[in-house]
Structure formats: structure tokens, C-alpha cells
Amino acid sequence: MPETHRPLTTAALAAALAVSATCAPAQDGPSVTISDARLAVTQLAVGAGAALGALSQDAGEAIYLQSGATTLDGLARAVADTGTPEALTAEDGALVARLPLVVLQGAELALEPGESLKLDRQSGSYLLSLGRVTIDGADVSATGAEHPDLPAFRPFIAGVGQASLSLSGSRFAGLGYGDAGATAGVFVSGRGLLSGGTSDPLRDNSFDGLYGVTLSGIDTAELTGNRFTGMRGSALSIAATGPVTLRNNRFEDTGGAQALHLSGGGGHLLSGNLLEGGRGKGLRIDDGARDVTLEDNRVTGFGGSGVTLAEGAGCLLLRGNKVADNDGAGIRLREAGAFVLAGNEITGNAGPGIEVARQRPDTAGTVIGNRLAGNRRGVRGVGLARLHLARNDMGGQMPRLLSGDLDQMTGAWLRDSRADGASNLVVEGVAARFPAALRRDAADRAFDTCSQGGGA
């Protein structure tokens, strides 16, 4: 039989939080209690690195899974035995939670294929994992009228600590509110007690109408085959200290400052992703992220720039991407380090196809073999250190070729391009020279140089 308790004291919860998964007590069923939710909110605030004042002040009670491993149905049976059966009830083929669900360290909760969990907005429900929550082929969504004391509140899912959330093949709908990542919809943090900072892969999920998905303070992350649609804020925000891999994800109709924001860390790979349509920018990489490869992505139809690389992001390779029909620049590099743009198609953007501004001192940018057509300007440069333009096709960009500090180079570029159809121009500061022809593997060699420590 499930072991149940009421209430859980502050001291008892603190002790439970310190229990490792390897030290969970042996028992026949899950150990469940109903107690003050403020204790859980405190742990969430630690994981988020931010205060959650309104949530803390109106916390109420929560369901705590203290120990043991159980399914959603098993948790419902255990909750019924606490004397508060209305906290988690079966309705129309789903389980509806009317209190927050908190999984403590040493405990595990599994949502299995075909199961549905609805988190009630009016009663302030959410799902917080301090232990282990696995959602595989299930459905989690918000339900109910607005919260009487926090009208903006919407339910959310948050995981704090080592591999606290595992999401695969599942659907998440209507979750998340506010600018704090912890309550955005789905939140994974590497901070917190006994945390190691690693996120489980997120694979083949559908995120529909969330405020956003946030990964914070993580060492590594992998997201493959996910779909983000109708997101009310930035669809995906990742703050990393190590490598992040994003493959074959789709971002459609986003409402935030950018659809995808990646900051910090290094060794990142973004490949085969589709970013299509959004109120803000498409993709932003910043905060010193380095050794970043973007290849075969498509970024189109955003209200701002398609791709932005800024704030010290360096050693960047953008290859084979299609960036089209955005209301700002196609690819914008601002205060970035060394970069290579090779073989991209940049067309129909309302700003420059490529914009390089405030290039970091003692760094080089190589723009080779790209096709630019129908942009407001071809390449714009302001505050350059060293920029190499070679074998770019700008036949469809005439006559709006170069601008900014590069405007004075237009005549020289045209004279050189008449000889073989593709100019080879190096700009250092505001001076230009025509170097020897580049080797066919010039882009790969330039990226290898910076990834091995030869450039910022």
C-alpha cells in the first residue's frame, strides 16, 4: 500500500531534498504527502537563480512525491489515500491536477504513452521535478479559468538538477507565463541540490502555445525533431556552459524577441532546423558562445533580422543556410569574433544581406561563395577589423552591393569582379587589397584555425 503523510514539516522536507536517488528508502509503493507549496517554490527559485515573489506569496499546498517510483495512475491512487482525492482526479480520459505536483530527489514519476495530464490554471497547478520525471508519448496541457489572485498565471513544468526531466514524443500545450524562465512553460535548470548540469535529450516533442522552453545553466543539451508552434514568447532559450546540439527542429509563428536564443558555451551544432515566421528575430547567438556551426538551416519570414551573432560570439561557421524574406538583415554580426560565412543563400531581406558591425579587434571574417540577391544592400560593414570577401555571387544584388565603410570599395570590387566574375577583396579597417586566389577548402581551413585557438 502507498505510504501517505500529512503534513510535511519544513525540517522533514529539507531532509527529503537532501536524499540521493541511490539512497531512497525501500518500500512497496510511493510515499506521498500534501503540504505547504512554498518549500517547493524556494527550490525552484534556487534553480532559476531568480525570485518568484508572486508565486511564493500565494503558494498554497502541493502534492509531494517524497520517494519511490510510480506512474501517473499510481500517484492518483496515493493522493486519494491522503484524504484529499480532489487534488488529482480522473476526468474525460485525463487526470486533472488541482494542486502543484512536486517530485522530490530520490523519487520518480513516469507519464506513459497515451496518458494525459491537465494542470488546472484556476487552482495554481504546476509540475516541478527535483528528482526524476519521465514524459514519454504523453500529453500535458493547461486547463481551467484564470487564477483568482494571479490572472496572468498559467501552469508550467520545471525540472531542477541532474537529468530531472526527460521529454520524448510528447505534446505540451498552453503552458507558461511571464518573463522568468522558470515559469515559461518548460524549464530545465542545471542549478540546485546535487545537480550535475546535464539535460536529458528532448526528442520529437510538440510544444504548442507555450510562452517558451528554457534550458538554463546546463553543461550539455541535445534537441532533435521537436516542433515549436504558436509560442507566445521566445520559443527556445538556452544558456549553456558546454556543447548544445540542435537538429531538425521546427519553429513556426513565434511571438517573442527571437524564436531561438543560444548563449554561452561552446562546441555547438545547429543543423537542419527550420525557423519560419515570427514577430521578432529568427535566431540569436551571443554571450561569448564559441566554436559554433550552423549548417543547412532555413530562416525566413521574421519581423527582425534572420540570424544575429553578437556580444563576443566567436569562431562561427555558417554554411549552406538559406536566410530569406526577413524584415531586418539576413545575417547580422555585431561585436562578434572570427567567423566564416560559406555557401549560404541570402535573399529578399529588407535590410543588408550580411551586416558586420563593430568587429572585434584582431579577428577576421571570411565571406566566401555565398549568393546574395534582392536584399536592400548586399554587404554592409561598420567598424571593421579584417573582412575577406571572395567568390560571392551578387549578380542578383545589383546595383545595391556594398554599404557603410565598404561603400567606398564598390568601384574596386566591380573592377576586380569583371576579370573572372567573382571579386576577391580583403578589407582591413577602411583599406582594401586584392590577395592571391583562395584554395577551394578556404572556408574549412579558416574555421579550423579559429577552433584551434587561432582567433576569438
Image (cartoon, grey):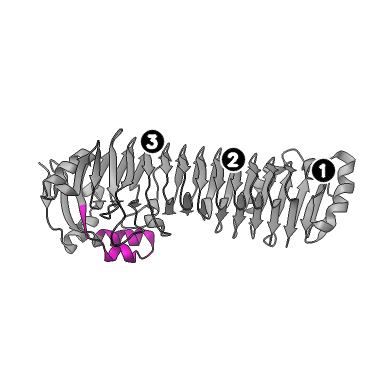
User: Where is residue 451 drawn, in percent x and y?
Assistant: 61, 49
55 part of magenta stretch: yes
Measured Cα–Cα span from mark 3 to mark 2: 22 Å
User: Where is residue 151 drawn, in percent x and y?
Assistant: 34, 59
Q: Amino acid at mark 3?
A: Gly
* Circle number at residue 297: 2
Q: Height in image: 394 above or below 351? A: above
User: Where is residue 26 drawn, in percent x and y?
Assistant: 15, 44
Q: Please say whether residue 337 is visible from this viewpoint.
A: no
Q: Amino acid at mark 2?
A: Asn
377 part of magenta stretch: no
Q: Nearer the viewer, residue 271 or 291?
A: 271
* Circle number at residue 437: 1
Residue shown at 72% from the left, 39% from the top: 441
* Circle number at residue 115: none
Q: Height in image: 74 above or below 191? A: above
Residue shown at 47% from the left, 45% from the top: 230
Precedes in sequence: disc 1 or disc 2: 2
Instruction: Name the element at disc 2.
Output: loop
Give left or right: position of 456 versus 150: right
Measured Cα–Cα span from mark 1 to mark 3: 50 Å
Residue interval drawn in magenta: 40-63
| Quadrant housing the N terminus | top left
Q: Nearer the viewer, residue 386 or 138?
A: 138
Q: Dot 1: within a 10 Å radius of its alpha carbon, few (fewer than 14), some, or many (20 or more) residues? A: few
